[in-house]
Amino acid sequence: MRLDYLSIFPGYFDVLGISLLGKAAVNGLVDVYAHDLRDWTHDRHRTVDDTPCGGGAGMVMKPDPWGEAFDEIIGTEPDPSVHVVFPSPSGEPFTQSVAHDLSSVERIVFCCGRYEGIDHRVIDYARSMWTVHEVSLGDYVLNGGEVAALAITEAVVRLVPGFMGNPQSLAEESFSAGQDGLLEYPLFTRPVSWRGLDVPEVLMSGHHGRIAKWRRDESIRLTRERRPDLTDSDVSARH
Ligand SMILES: N#Cc1c(-c2ccc3ccn(Cc4ccc(CN5CCCC5)cc4)c3c2)n[nH]c1N
């Protein structure tokens, strides 16, 4: 999998050389390339923004540098196998399902906007050439797309076959299909007693049926308390 990042702050992506992602890069599972959008400007100030047409606050990212960067990094021929991700406050929700779909893709290009966003013609042009995902991490405001691109990267790459040491742990996670969309149960490890707090006895019983039931009940309880939106009527009926 090749990952490209286009940003006026390419240094954000230095972190991708650390930990598991660094290991994946070393193992050849993932190739990471960060690009400075200003390398495709031609004026003395390396300008990437301008005032919004129609007025309004802030600045908008000019289309020209993006177009020239696309030509050099991706190419000038349409190729639907290239997936271009635009993190955006007005994007569709980024979900585990989207992460799963992207984990089988060979090439992803992250376009990280700043200011008030990117001239919309850049997204329209990208849609005419490649497969585009305009996604939002959630209902809160970031200052740009870089942090979102890092989060999306981690969510996607950990699903790439061969990346995680123990693929079984992926199957048991919240939001993965196998859990009925329920939140994960509480986790415990040794010591059994810590500052007057004990591991629930059932988990030390060795009785796998009771343990499985306790975990299921906890997942249902937590989901009903914290994420009623995840417990549709069908799921509720089953629990
Ligand atoms: N993913 C994701 C994101 C982002 C995100 C992603 C990409 C960019 C590029 C620039 N910004 C800054 C910004 C912030 C707010 C606005 C909204 N406007 C402000 C005044 C009228 C509406 C426009 C841009 C970005 C923010 N924020 N939150 C998420 N979940």
Image (tube, helix red, strand yellow):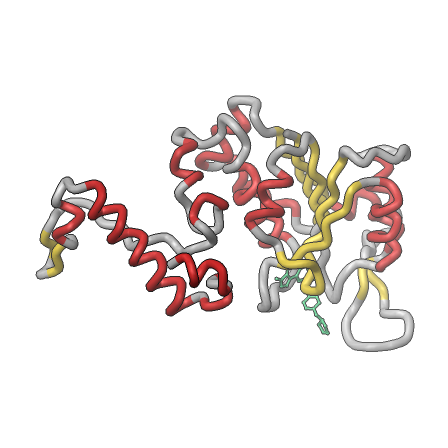
At horizontal 61% and vertical 64% (from top left) the residue drawn is 142
Along the line of sight, the residue nearer the viewer: 24 or 196: 196
The answer, for residue 41, to whether it is visible in the render is no
Taking the image as four quarters, which one is ligand 1 found in? bottom right
| Count of marks overlaid on the render | 0
Residue 1, image x, y percentages: 63, 29
Viewed as shown, does residue 179 lie left or right of 56?
left
At horizontal 40% and vertical 29% (from top left) the residue drawn is 165
Viewed as shown, does residue 89 lie left or right of 49?
left
Relative to 26, say whether 224 is above or below: below
Along the line of sight, the residue nearer the viewer: 66 or 9: 66
Q: Residue furthest front?
A: 237
Relative to 51, say whether 37 is above or below: above
- Give the quarter of the image for residue 33: top right
Residue 211, image x, y percentages: 22, 47
The answer, for residue 143, to whether it is visible in the render is yes
Along the line of sight, the residue nearer the viewer: 223 or 167: 223
Residue 72, image x, y percentages: 83, 34
Relative to 182, say whether 140 is above or below: below
Q: Quadrant of the C terminus?
A: bottom left
Relative to 107, say whether 173 is above or below: below
Residue 209, image x, y percentages: 22, 43
Viewed as shown, does residue 101 lie left or right of 203?
right
Q: Residue furthest top?
A: 27
At horizontal 70% and vertical 60% (from top left) the residue drawn is 91
At horizontal 90% and vertical 75% (from top left) the residue drawn is 54
